[in-house]
Image (cartoon, helix red, strand yellow):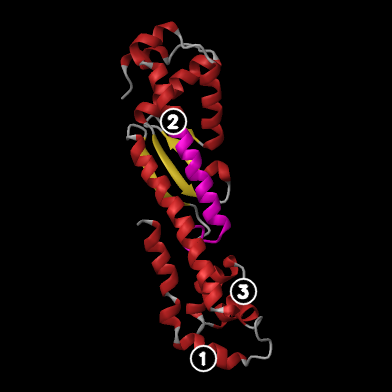
């Protein structure tokens, strides 16, 4: 439920700047921020309020711009502490933008736990009333995943030279489809990639090896999935 002052003034016509103040109230009092693993940057950070409003990254950035350029209506200043809420929103949004940048980097470097599925995946959600330290904790976790993944990929490429024939996205693709090597359709998806290091390799022998070790092949994605929520 909104405060009576918000419900009362919601029925009146407002300027864009005044409307931004009411949107701020909705976001910071009843909103939930969602950080989502999605290809489009604007969809990676969203906010949904209890009154049904939804804000994507671009809309929140525009809201911040409007608020910073708007003089707070006199009738709202004393009752709703708009300036305090604005400061909180700016600080929270800055951290969420950093989370979005970290998520984009995780997608770019091909982390197995991020972007493996076609559908958007919610990485975490946080109430707008939560302490900034909670958002900081999520940001630090994402940044740690970047460091750990870069180290793991570098170490693996040094130990297993044949991995250097593939991009990380290709490796993720192989890990996803190799466990289904017994299925002809799945096998046809991976064989063209598998033969790149050794074009003369015998297909039946390679396929037999993949089927024999399919249990081990399923482990990297499962481990990465657990890491995402660590």
Observer-nearest of 186 and 96: 96
Q: Quadrant of residue 65?
A: top right
**Magenta segment boundaries in residue numbering:** 92-116
Q: Secondary structure at mark 1?
A: helix
Taking the spot 41% from the left edge, 74% from the top edge, the residue there is: 219
Structural distance between the alpha carbons of marks 3 and 2: 41 Å
Residue 39 location (% of width, % of height): 57, 51
Q: Is residue 3 visible?
A: yes
In front: label 1 or label 3:
3
Q: Is residue 94 above or below residue 121?
A: above
* Earlier sequence position, callout 1 versus callout 3: 3
- Residue topped by disc 2: 91
Residue 125 location (% of width, % of height): 38, 44
Asked if disc 1 and disc 2 are in contact, CB closer than 8 Å, the reply is: no
- Residue topped by disc 1: 208
Observer-nearest of 5 and 102: 102
| In-image side of 114 versus 29 (left or right) | right
Q: Is residue 38 visible?
A: no
Q: Is residue 161 above or below residue 113?
A: below
Observer-nearest of 80 and 15: 80
* Mark 1 neighbour density, 10 Å: few (under 14) some (14–19) many (20 or more): few
Residue farthest toward the top in the current orientation of the protein? 74
Asked if disc 1 and disc 3 are in contact, CB closer than 8 Å, the reply is: no
* Earlier sequence position, callout 3 versus callout 2: 2
Residue 164, labelled with which disc?
A: 3
Taking the spot 38% from the left edge, 20% from the top edge, the residue there is: 84
């Amino acid at each position: 439920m909104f405060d009576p002052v918000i419900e009362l003034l919601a029925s009146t016509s407002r300027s864009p700047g005044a409307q931004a103040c009411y949107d701020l109230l909705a976001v910071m009092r009843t909103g939930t921020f969602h950080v989502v693993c999605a290809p489009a940057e604007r969809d990676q950070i969203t906010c949904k309020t209890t009154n049904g409003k939804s804000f994507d990254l671009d809309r929140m950035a525009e809201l911040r711009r409007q608020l910073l350029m708007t003089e707070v209506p006199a009738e709202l200043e004393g009752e709703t502490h708009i300036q305090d809420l604005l400061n909180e929103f700016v600080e929270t949004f800055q951290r969420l933008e950093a989370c979005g940048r970290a998520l984009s980097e995780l997608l770019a470097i091909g982390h197995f736990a991020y972007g493996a599925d076609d559908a958007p995946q919610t990485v975490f959600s946080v109430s707008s009333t939560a302490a900034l330290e909670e958002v900081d904790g999520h940001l630090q976790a994402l940044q740690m995943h970047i460091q750990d993944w870069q180290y793991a990929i570098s170490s693996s490429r040094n130990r297993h030279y044949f991995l250097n024939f593939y991009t990380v996205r290709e490796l993720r693709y192989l890990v996803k489809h190799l466990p289904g090597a017994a299925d002809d359709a799945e096998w046809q998806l991976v064989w063209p990639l598998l033969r790149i290091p050794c074009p003369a390799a015998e297909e039946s022998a390679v396929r037999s090896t993949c089927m024999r070790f399919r249990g081990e092949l399923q482990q990297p994605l499962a481990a990465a999935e657990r890491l995402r929520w660590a």
